[in-house]
Amino acid sequence: MSSSRVQTICPFCGVGCGITLKVDERGRLTGVEPVPGHPISHGKLCEKGWSTAYAIRPDNRITQPLKRCRDRFEPVSWDEALDDISQSIREILDESGPAAIGVISSARATNEDNYAAQKFARAVLKTNNVDHCARICHSPTVAGLKQTLGSGAMTNSAKDIFATDLIVVIGADPTENHSVLGGQIFAAQQHGAKLIVIDPRQTRLAKVADIHLQLKPGSNIALINAMLQVIFEENWHNADFIAERCDGFDELARQVETITPESVESITGVDAAQIRAVAKIYAQAEKAMILYGMGITQFVSGTQNVIALSDLALVCGQIGRPGTGINPLRGQNNVQGACDMGCLPNVYPGYQGADNDAVQQKFNQAWQGEVANQPGLTSLGMSKAALAGEFRGLILFGEDPVVTDPDQNHVRDAYKQLDLLVVAELTMTETAKLADYVLPAASFAEKEGTFTNCERRVQHIAQALQPPGSAMGDWQWLNALAQRLGSDQLNWPNSQAVFDEMAALNPAYLGMRYDKMIQAQGLQWPCNDDAPNGTDILHRDSFPIGKARLIPVHYTAIDESVDADYPLLLTTNRLHFHYGCGSMTRKSPLLERETPPGLLFIHPDDARQLKITRYAPIGVRSRRGYIETRAMITPDVPPGLVSMPYHFKEAPSNQLTNTAQDPITKMPELKACAVTVFPLPAG
Ligand code: SF4
């Protein structure tokens, strides 16, 4: 074997930077390089990208199937594991029906793995119980933008950051979470674009922004409605765009008529003059681009927050042109793709409604048999049903809900109730530790397929390495399991065949050809007869729903306010050096060195009052759980607010978080819950 260099895509966030994996003569990964001229990353990588090699090193990898024998795992063959699993599935289906079983797929896995997962659920198990972690990041984006614009994705492209006059970053921290894009925002500002940051924390971008609105957590709608009131009062709205392309103007104008900036000062904590100034700058900018993240979506009002942003962009005509738009920054590398593939209980691939008869007929025909026809459960719904004894079997890959879902104790208890828990993973995660069977998965570098990044770009990932031991790709073991359950529906010869089947059934991917997608360094959907080379800007001339909908939304307070027992508000955040549950990035000594495990960020005034010193051990308690960690004292969080990352199993912030949900998408309110913090004796 000779050494090789394989071009693929960084697996650590939704930006989707190009990386080259360097492999030596013995088939070992020896290094990583950025791809010069890549359409998004332009020859750059952040620290996570540079550390990719550690994430997939063979040490600690699960290399063969494991079966639980009381309180330990024993290695078994694939045949034994799959025979046993299929037997348990049959028993659950016979005794309790398809409503009692489900699949959780992964925003880290390929489109092909995700397509196979939802097809396995719907065509083999006959259930719509299929979900993935978009539930807890951008499900309100999909629901909100679908209602207002007809399409739940980033409207513009990353390159538009350099084509705009004004960048508004709201509820997002791109230098930590989407670092290469964060760097591009810095660069665009240096080249003359104005930068407005709206965030309760003083993020790195907030510190250099032209204006930082430091609003109170959960007050987004009050702030945006007040901006709309000013825009209408001053006649700064784009009347031609509204008349030509939007419905619902009168209702929206009526709804915000009395919501003046002064009337929301106490809710938002933002000075009325600042709200007026930002409304003017946004409305009068020639081209203004909104970028948002989970500071918008992870609230009980998540979907309404997204709708409010959409209202703002539409009334100012800031959509459908270069340098404009509403742009959700998707977190995980393939969360956009997992949604596009239909790994959601209510939609088939391409967001085709699972409750629509014509769609069901289409998939009955394509998959040669009756597909699931009952509504499905979300991932949190599956946990709840398990605790109620109504849900018995879960097949899960590439996710660690015990660390990443809210109210960890609740998730752990639910998974312990299951009769069958199958987890396919690279390493032994907290969720895998609860499994009946743990299957060895292949990493992104050990398989071929596609990821779809946050700007809707479908990109090829190439196999650089052999999987360790008997590890294999997810669609391959799902196929082996389907065969044992009597179905040939997942029996594809290769990843391209999975992609081709999916593209033929997904209207947004209909015109994508594998070779063309590779050659073009990715194609952005929709790609079809009207747009054979893909689409960089959505909604240029029309919306998929004809006219866009302006929908009035009302401010809703966060579910859990502070009180005498729990006097501080906790919000969650992510750190530049880690990704998700940390199972990949924490293998890198370089990244691990940068931040001690855990950490609670607290303002100096609160720390002084509580007699907490820098790095001192502290206890944090909410109504749901208790953890111990260390204090980082910083004015980056305002007084009254504390903040914690969720990457660390030693100090799992999701022991504390609230499960109160957005009624539309069941998104839990991960961005706000009441806690009490106190010093612990040093030791
Ligand atoms: Fe990887 Fe995201 Fe960093 Fe790019 S920005 S190198 S995709 S982690």
Image (cartoon, rainbow, N blue to C red):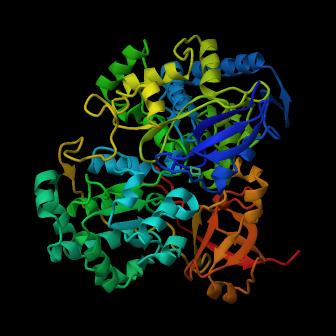
Work out whether 357 lies above or below 459.
above
**Which of the two residues, 324 or 138, is positioned nearer the viewer here?**
324
* Front residue of 59 and 273: 59
355 above or below 677? above
Residue beneath the point at 82% across and 22% down: 76
Quadrant for residue 103, please give it. Answer: top right
**Residue 378 higher or lower than 177, as above or below:** above
**Relative image position of residue 9 (x, y in whole percent):** 57, 41
Q: Which quarter of the rendered picture does the N terminus lie within?
A: top right
Q: Residue at x 24, y 61 (%)?
A: 552
Report if residue 377 is visible in the image. no
Q: Quadrant of residue 292?
A: bottom left
Q: Quadrant of residue 646?
A: bottom right
Residue 284, percent from left and from top: 23, 71
Q: Is residue 166 left or right of residue 574?
A: left
The percent position of residue 128, horizontal first and vertical second, equals 47, 30
Residue occupying image coordinates x 26% and y 60%: 318
Position above or below: 675 against 350: below
- Front in this rendered view, residue 333 or 141: 333
**Quadrant occupied by the C terminus:** bottom right
| Residue name at image x 25 percent, y 76 percent | 280
Residue 359 is left or right of residue 218, and the answer is left
Q: Position of residue 391 (x, y in %)?
A: 59, 34
The foreground one among 512 and 201 is 512
Residue 668 appears in the figure: yes
Say left or right for 526 vs 13: left
